[in-house]
């Protein structure tokens, strides 16, 4: 069997960077995709030296339509077969829907939904044909609840959750697995990006990106379909079973309150 190749989007920092380390420790070859070329090249050099693996670096902005196809075409030309697709790239914005820039919110949909679906659609048929491999989507506990003051981001993660569950069931028995990792607040650059327009007046306790990535990597290897790292985050994921929707909306609105 040929060595496993793992493609990771948003690989220049945070959970994506830590997932690259996890898969490198499996001696998987990597394809790193992000906008930050310099950070990816530094990561790639370190992983090549430590694990003697191949690491390809592709600079791409998934907010731009056509990026997913360009990534796919580049790897086809290079003769690289992707066995595991890690859809990690994503971002959100704090603020009321009507007040945030519409163009930027549409870019959330492009990165968090459209690019994820397109990459999955491009690479999944080959996995099915080979009867091996899988998809690791990085969702969020936000996907379990509505998100006033982060409406588009929460909705995008609800899409990822529903999409992941659906194709998980479609692929049962195919040899291809689907995992949707659902972290809560994590120590990454996400909050800085999300608060570029507005600032929350409190900070939530956060898990480290390394801890989240480790649990997500382990869940993927165990073929678990929806891991939620952290006890508090698991409880958040259960809120729809415990509270009326109106109460959940008000709770999340309070959590995402702004200065």
Image (cartoon, helix red, strand yellow):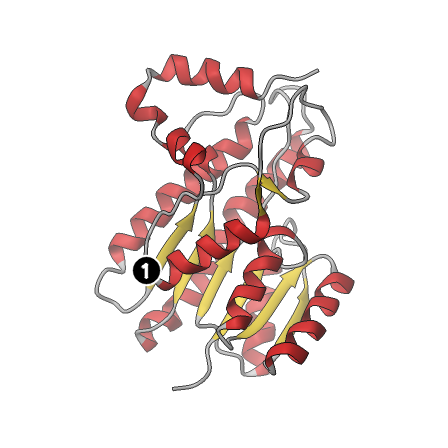
Image position of 193 with respect to 171: above or below = above
Q: Nearer the viewer, residue 47 or 176?
A: 47
- What residue would you read off at disc 1? 223
Image position of 144 with respect to 30: above or below = above
Q: Is residue 108 left or right of residue 177?
A: right
Q: Is residue 256 left or right of residue 159?
A: right
Residue 182: percent from left, percent from top? 44, 43
Image position of 70 with respect to 48: above or below = above
Q: Nearer the viewer, residue 88 or 100?
A: 88
Image quadrant occupied by the N terminus:
bottom left
Residue 242: percent from left, percent from top? 30, 21
Image position of 10 with respect to 30: above or below = above
Give the secondary structure at mark 1. loop
Give the residue displayed 71% in from the left and 57% down from the top. 35
Q: Nearer the viewer, residue 113 or 10?
A: 10
Q: Is residue 136 left or right of residue 32?
A: left
Q: Nearer the viewer, residue 197 or 228?
A: 228
Give the residue displayed 42% in from the left and 40% down from the top. 159
Residue 112: percent from left, percent from top? 54, 45
Give the residue displayed 67% in from the left and 60% down from the top. 60
Instruction: Please tell me how crowded label 1 is: few (under 14), some (14-19), or many (20+) other residues with Cα within 10 Å.
Output: some
């Amino acid at each position: 069997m040929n060595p496993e190749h793992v493609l990771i989007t948003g690989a220049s920092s945070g959970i994506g960077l830590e997932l690259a380390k996890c898969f490198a420790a499996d001696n998987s070859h990597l394809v790193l995709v992000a906008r930050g070329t310099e950070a990816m090249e530094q990561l790639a050099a370190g992983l090549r030296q430590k694990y003697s693996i191949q690491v390809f670096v592709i600079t791409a902005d998934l907010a731009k339509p056509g990026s997913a196809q360009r990534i796919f075409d580049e790897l086809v030309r290079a003769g690289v077969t992707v066995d595991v697709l890690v859809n990690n790239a994503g971002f959100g914005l704090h603020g009321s829907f009507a007040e945030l820039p519409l163009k930027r919110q549409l870019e959330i949909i492009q990165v968090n939904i459209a690019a994820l679906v397109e990459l999955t659609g491009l690479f999944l048929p080959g996995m099915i044909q080979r009867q091996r491999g899988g998809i690791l989507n990085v969702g969020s506990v936000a996907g379990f609840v509505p998100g006033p003051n982060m409406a588009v981001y929460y909705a995008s993660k609800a899409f990822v959750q529903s999409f992941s569950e659906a194709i998980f069931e479609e692929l049962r028995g195919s040899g291809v697995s689907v995992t949707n990792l659902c972290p809560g607040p994590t120590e990454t650059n996400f909050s800085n990006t999300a608060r570029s327009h507005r600032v929350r007046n409190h900070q939530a306790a956060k898990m480290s990106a390394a801890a989240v990535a480790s649990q997500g990597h382990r869940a993927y290897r165990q073929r678990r379909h929806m891991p939620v790292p952290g006890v508090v985050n698991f409880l958040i994921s259960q809120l729809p079973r415990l509270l009326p929707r109106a109460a959940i909306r008000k709770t999340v609105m309070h959590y995402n309150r702004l200065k």
